[in-house]
Amino acid sequence: MATVDLNCDLGEGFDDAALFPLVTSANIACGVHAGDDATMEAACRLAVRHRVAIGAHPSYPDREGFGRRDMDLGTAELRSLVLDQVAALRRAADRAGGAVRYLKPHGALYNRIARDPGPAGAVAAAAAEAQLPLLGPASSAIADAADRHGVPFFREAFPDRGYTADGRLAPRGTTGSVIESPDDVAERALALALTGRVRSVDGGELALEVDSLCLHGDSPGAPAAARAVRDRLSAAGVRLGSFA
């Protein structure tokens, strides 16, 4: 029987109460692209209540753009920025009776470290100092940087996002970049969990190595998609369990 993690970006001001019971890992916003001390603690309390692994979800300092605008930061500045956000979430998790178990960057920072060795190295160094495993895309700059820094690395894929033929996420706003139908999201999740394959936006078949499936908490109908994914995986005999 296959086992896969189901993670979701949470603590961002959307429907956390509906999503926490459905996922196994929570990427919690650390107060920079979204949230604050109160929302971090509330999200951590929900994670503890539902036995969901807590992950730090740091971003570029871009609240106006929801962390989706790329920035050029120096290596030391980026490392410090990530560590500060991890520390903030750790304080919130401690107050809630939980602990931070892993690190997954958000938005533009996530996309940048997938392809750029410089920022990837800074984030991997931060993860090593924080003693946290990393969650990110397979066969990427951050996967290589994690290996160099001795950081455990887990691979994820997005059933609710479209992929280009080269395995990158299709830019938001382009055709097929966001999958909104819960049935379609569930079908893609099952294919990824069982075969490691999914259709790209150009109609081809793409192979992706997967330890975890990610759903975006800010996507339209996210709770319905999460429920559909859980139901489809369970019916196929796939277990859900956090990698962390």
Image (cartoon, helix red, strand yellow):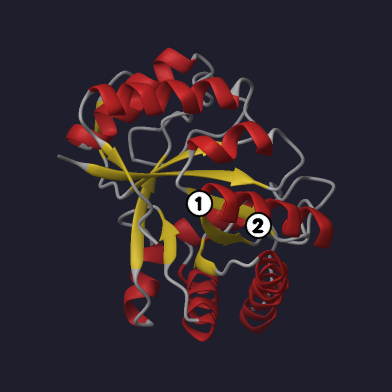
Local crowd at mark 1 within 10 Å, few (<14), some, or many (≥20)?
many
N-terminal of the pair, mark 2 or mark 1, is 2
Where is 9 relative to 232, above or below?
below
For the point 75% across and 46% down, which residue is it? 66
Of residues 155 and 241, the one drawn nearer to the viewer in this rendering: 241
Per the image, the residue denoted by label 1 is 52
On screen, residue 215 versus residue 88, left or right, reads left
Q: Where does residue 144 sit, x and y in percent of width and height?
A: 34, 69
Q: Quadrant of residue 145?
A: bottom left
Q: Quadrant of residue 139?
A: bottom left
Which quadrant of the figure contains the N terminus? top left
Residue at the far left in the pictured view = 1
Q: Where does residue 103 sit, x and y in percent of width and height?
A: 52, 65
Where is 82 relative to 180, above or below?
below
For the point 48% across and 40% down, which residue is it? 23
Q: Where does residue 30 sit, x and y in percent of width and height?
A: 71, 61
Q: CA distance from mark 2 to mark 1?
A: 9 Å
Q: Which mark is residue 44?
A: 2
Of residues 36 and 42, the one drawn nearer to the viewer in this rendering: 42
On screen, residue 4 versus residue 79, left or right, reads left
Secondary structure, mark 1, is loop
Of residues 4 and 210, the one drawn nearer to the viewer in this rendering: 4
Secondary structure, mark 2, is helix
